[in-house]
Amino acid sequence: MDTHRLSRNNSICPTPEDVLLDLVKTNKQDKVRSLIRENKTLLSHQYPYPYFGKILYVACSEASTFPETVATLLELGADPCDETEDQGEAIHVAAKLSRSNILKVLVKYLTQDEINHLFKNNNALLLLIKEGNLNNKSEIIESAKVLIKSGININHADSKNLTPILWAIKKNSIELIELLLSLSNLDIDSFTSNGKTARELILSKYSSDLLLPNNNTSSANPKDLLFSYLKSNNENAFINFNNGDIVDYKDADNSSHTLLQLSCQLGLENAVKHLIENKSDLKKTTEKETQTPLELAGENGYFEIVDLLLKHDPSLRVSSATITTLLKKMNLAKNSDDKYENCFLSLLKNQDEESLNTQNTLSQTPLHLAVKVAKPDHVLELLNKGASLANKNQFGIMPIEHIDAEVLEDHLDKCVEINDIDKNNIYVTLNYKTLLPSPLRTERKGSDNQKCPEEGGNDFIQNPVPETDAIFHMCKAPHLKYLLTHPIIVTFLLLKWYKIYSLFRMNLIFYTLFLASLLGYVFSSYGQFHYIPQDGSLSFISSISYTCLCVTFVILLLRELFQLLVSPLNYYKDLDNWIEVVLIVIVGSILFIDNPTNDTRKQLSSVAILLSAFELVLMMGQHPKFTTNVIMFKRVSINFMKFLSWYFLLIAAFALSFFILFSENEDDEIPTKKPNNLTGLQMEHNEKKEEETNFFINPGISLFKTLVMLTGEFDASDMNFHSFPFTSKFIFILFVLMIALYS
């Protein structure tokens, strides 16, 4: 995806989306047509509060919008079947608002199947009667006529198994009742409300002037009858329909559910058995309900149906979303209610590694939730089936960050398999799968989750998470550190080390050559040491070391630039990289500064040699044999620097106190007879020597001496305790006790 796109920032002009919204609300069809032709994506823009829908939904829901405006949007490509969350499709919105003029436009762009699309198991006619404004009788009747004329199913029953005629009776709308009774295909005998059919309710509530159709139960749509039996939980009628032969309707659907989906959702075990016997498709879904029958049964806790489906087809799988939903319900369910747990265990037996590691929109897998809320046994079941501990969610969190140490230890123990201890040839199998991040698997919305990866059920992309992230977290987590010595972890790290050992060796050889050439160049030529005799062989060494230093310097520079470009943020977080940056600057100065002074040469040389040697020690610390020593060195150094920074104010206070007490004042000097025969040069030399022996002659030197004393170098022979014998000794002893002993 191209991330470099133009975007609006702080513009005072309205956006094209806002312009389109205003044009639609003011019914300016020509301008709407012109604007959308320039930018077709405006039709799919999701408007925020108070609309929460696309432009066609806005047009159908706004009372001021003309039918011609809706027709213009449909002509330009607006999808009339696009569903708005909690509102339904355009035909459902118009029906709920009783907008007959909008319905007349919509039905022209819909097929008969699309006209019968359901929203929450209601077709548009049911929504019109249930939610329409019955006070506006003319609009209600006109809207109903439009829908009936377009071929809507007048006998469709909602989730309560109530048809439009039953709802019209319930709403006491005599006009709608008369309109529906005038239809020859109306069924008033197959569906009931409170145990009474529509015929019985009409005869008991209304006058006998209403002309009722003949009993046409036998001529009712078989598919509608089958769905009505399921909705009313009448399994006997469902099973006995047509003497049990429903092969022609085994995969029938009402655009919302298939017969098998609805049976599984309602927990009708006998109906499920009947459909299986009639060879119903166990994987078929609808556009409205993308969950498979197995997923619906599992999420609702019908473990008998789950076992029945799995027994008939052991290859069935469920999505990771279903496993996650079951984990949530298991956490919320009472201890005595184990139906969700039974479903979880039954479904998990058939799951594979791919389905368990499929990530949702937040990049979470079932294991992310399980380590927080599930029982240890359930977490172990997920791990043993191949759930990865290293998959990161959208917030960069891995399941291993919340796992219990004992659970992880049990799982690692099970990852070690031994063929037969009694045999001479023992084979040990180590399973590292759960430590590695799985390939990213993102479920496609509306796709068949039962498909295998190569069939396109999931999208696969390479996981960018490093393979050692899980173990790296174990190093930082105190309660997991003891598991670093587990055979699985030790052998995994050893294999990783063998994989990169050749690179480490090449890098070490290169850096050793760089350090050797630096030392050779500094001591043969650059340092200009007077005690090293300059001869022909030294000049040869100087030229060779200079050439080698230039080459290795360029390689080092390119290496660091490559690391910086690959991961700039991580580069600056590593102290080793900062040392190398400073080293590159100093070595570059040594190579490319013309005619530096002798003092500059010596300072650059000393710092370069120190930093390069320091870097070599850190590099050697990457070898397993030296890692412990280098880590101890780093830890002690860091702790000392923390101590120094934390107590620096107190150290500076001691340094100033020593300066005040131990610096020699003129009043404190004991008059001594100076030899008259000393020259001025000798007197100046004696004064300089005296300053060198007094480390508290000024605040700067006093601070330096105090820092040296922190290491335990207490040279009190040069301290003048005579001027203030009590105060000076008290402060000095206090310094020894409070700073030196505790450092």
Image (spheres, rainbow, N blue to C red):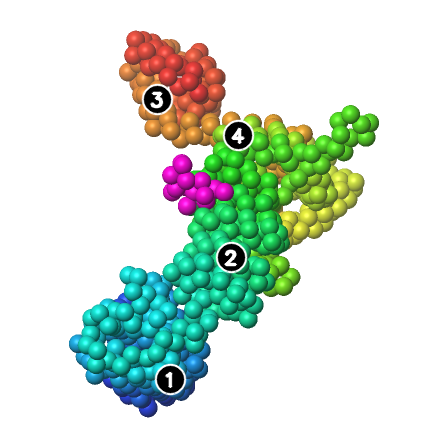
Q: How far across and down, in percent of the image, does residue 344 sit?
A: 50, 45
Marks 4 and 1, how far apart at CA: 65 Å
Query: In this picture, which residue range is highlighted in magenta?
Result: 329-342
Q: Residues within 10 Å of mark 4 (few under 14, many from 20)?
A: few
Marks 4 and 2, how far apart at CA: 42 Å
List the single residue furthest toward the left. 135
Toward the viewer: 280 or 711?
A: 280
Image side of residue 356 versus residue 372, left or right: right
Which numbered disc, 4 or 1, marks the residue closer to the eye?
A: 1
* Residue 78 against residue 463 in the figure, above or below: below
Toward the viewer: 546 or 44?
A: 44
Toward the viewer: 378 or 731?
A: 378
Asked if residue 626 is among those painted magenta in the image, a careful observer would answer no
Q: How far across and down, in percent of the image, does residue 478 sit?
A: 49, 30
Residue for badge 1: 150
Image side of residue 248 versus residue 212, left or right: right
The first of marks 4 and 2 along the sequence is 2
Which numbered disc, 2 or 3, marks the residue closer to the eye?
A: 2
Asked whether the viewer can see residue 315, the reply is yes
- Give the numbered dot on residue 473: none
Residue for badge 4: 406
Residue for badge 3: 654
Q: How far across and down, in percent of the image, does residue 387 sit?
A: 57, 45
Q: Quadrant of residue 8?
A: bottom left
Q: Residues within 10 Å of mark 2 (few under 14, many from 20)?
A: many
The first of marks 1 and 2 along the sequence is 1
